[in-house]
Image (tube, helix red, strand yellow):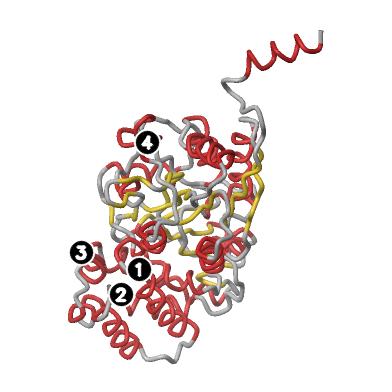
């Protein structure tokens, strides 16, 4: 009887579940409250196939995780899968032959017709072959504002970066840090690049990072961006935290008024019980130029020789893009789906605004896609020095920035 029952069981479920469960180590840097909730969605969906998600979370965000992930892959100790951001850094590993090709799966499941913006899949493509699975769309050009902080200071909630800067002295008088930020290097770079698109405008950003026009980078149009960055570095004084989610907590606690951060931060606000659009308002493009980068995260799969790991990799790759996964994962994370055929319900006003901007085509390529990892590192180092030392002359910083652009690749 037992033998018959087992046979019936496997006849019923063999198409859905592998005969043997496989442990698949998945590395990522999603460790905040909302990010952990999003990871659980992926893990649960994957485990439902009969495989086992082995969580390889790396604390410290991308700036810490990227070199650790890269070193494991190149050092012969690859994980089964890893989250990574789009850009040229992972492209070097693809070109060196470390990553698995998923073109056949992409063609069977019609990724080219489903994924939007199409640039997300373009960033996964090398020599017409697809090497990663986009999981979500993120943008960085957002100013998040605490309505409680402005009410405490008796100041109207700003509708632009210009109004926000003007409100900073009054916020200070009421013991409120105008602009919260973590002190990790990547956050300094994020603020500067977000200001270049939002305050300088998309044409300025593209001419500097796309055309790599050093003379323009040293000129008056970019001087406006550095003036905004100068305002920002004075406004962050008193924001003595490291992690981006701890900076978000300052808004949650009413200790800070604003934060320049990607749209993923709204997951933290929602996780804390705040209402987006009421307790926290957002300004896309900081209320100046409403253009967004359509970047985000993707999953990459290092080459392995174990057929069971290969099968588990393919199962995860397929699950990431399933409609139900896309909805549940992105609602938890505060990001947007990468499938054009899924619809999110109960989205925040900021998610709705982001979708509208992307659908209108007001999209700019990210710096990570336009510049090499070495150039990004040089800009980041400069921004760390500039933001951490308010006496660093603005003119000198722009000169050094133009010199980096001159040799950028």
Q: Which residue is mark 3?
A: 203
Q: Is residue 377 visible?
A: yes
Query: Where residue 218 sits: x, y (%)?
Result: 23, 83
Picture disc at residue 155:
none
Q: Above or below — where is 135 with respect to 262?
A: above
Q: What is the count of numbered marks?
A: 4
Pointer 2 residue:
225
Circle number at residue 104:
4
Residue drawn 25% across the image and 76% down it? 222
Circle 1 sits on which residue? Answer: 195
**Residue lying furthest right in this view?**
1
Mark in the foreground, 4 or 3: 4
- The residues bearing labels 1 and 3 have C-alpha atoms spaced at a distance of 13 Å
Q: Nearer the viewer, mark 4 or mark 2?
A: 4
Q: For marks 2 and 3, give the one nearer the viewer.
A: 3
Q: Position of residue 24 (x, y in %)?
A: 62, 45
């Amino acid at each position: 009887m037992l033998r018959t029952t087992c046979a019936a069981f496997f006849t019923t479920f063999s198409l859905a579940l592998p005969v043997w469960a496989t442990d698949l180590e998945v590395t990522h840097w999603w460790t905040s409250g909302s990010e952990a909730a999003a990871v659980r969605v992926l893990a649960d969906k994957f485990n439902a196939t009969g495989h086992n998600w082995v969580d390889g979370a790396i604390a410290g965000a991308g700036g810490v995780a990227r070199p650790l992930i890269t070193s494991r892959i190149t050092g012969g100790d690859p994980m089964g899968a890893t989250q990574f951001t789009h850009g040229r850094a992972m492209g070097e590993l693809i070109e060196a032959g470390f990553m698995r090709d998923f073109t056949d799966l992409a063609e069977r499941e019609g990724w080219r017709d489903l994924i939007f913006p199409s640039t997300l899949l373009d960033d996964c493509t090398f020599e017409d072959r697809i090497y990663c699975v986009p999981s979500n769309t993120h943008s960085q050009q957002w100013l998040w504002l605490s309505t409680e902080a402005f009410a405490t200071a008796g100041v109207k909630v700003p509708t632009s970066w210009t109004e926000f800067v003007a409100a900073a002295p009054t916020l200070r008088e009421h013991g409120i840090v105008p602009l919260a930020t973590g002190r990790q290097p990547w956050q300094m770079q994020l603020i500067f690049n977000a200001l270049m698109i939002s305050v300088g405008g998309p044409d300025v950003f593209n001419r500097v990072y796309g055309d790599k026009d050093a003379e323009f980078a040293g000129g008056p149009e970019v001087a406006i961006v550095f003036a905004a960055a100068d305002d920002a570095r004075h406004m962050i004084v008193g924001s003595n935290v490291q992690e981006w989610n701890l900076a978000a907590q300052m808004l949650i606690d009413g200790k800070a008024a604003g934060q320049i951060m990607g749209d993923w931060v709204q997951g933290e606000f929602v996780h804390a019980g705040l209402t987006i659009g009421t307790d926290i308002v957002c300004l896309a493009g900081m209320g100046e130029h409403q253009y967004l980068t359509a970047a985000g995260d993707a999953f990459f799969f290092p080459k392995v020789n174990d057929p069971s790991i290969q099968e588990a990799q393919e199962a995860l790759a397929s699950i990431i893009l399933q409609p139900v996964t896309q909805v549940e994962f992105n609602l938890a994370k505060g990001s947007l789906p990468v499938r054009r055929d899924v619809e999110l319900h109960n989205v925040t006003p900021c998610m709705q605004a982001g979708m509208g901007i992307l659908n209108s085509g007001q999209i700019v390529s990210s710096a990570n896609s336009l510049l090499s990892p070495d150039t990004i590192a040089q800009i980041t180092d400069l921004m760390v020095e500039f933001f951490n030392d308010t006496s660093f002359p603005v003119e000198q910083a722009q000169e050094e920035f133009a010199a980096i652009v001159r040799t950028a690749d």
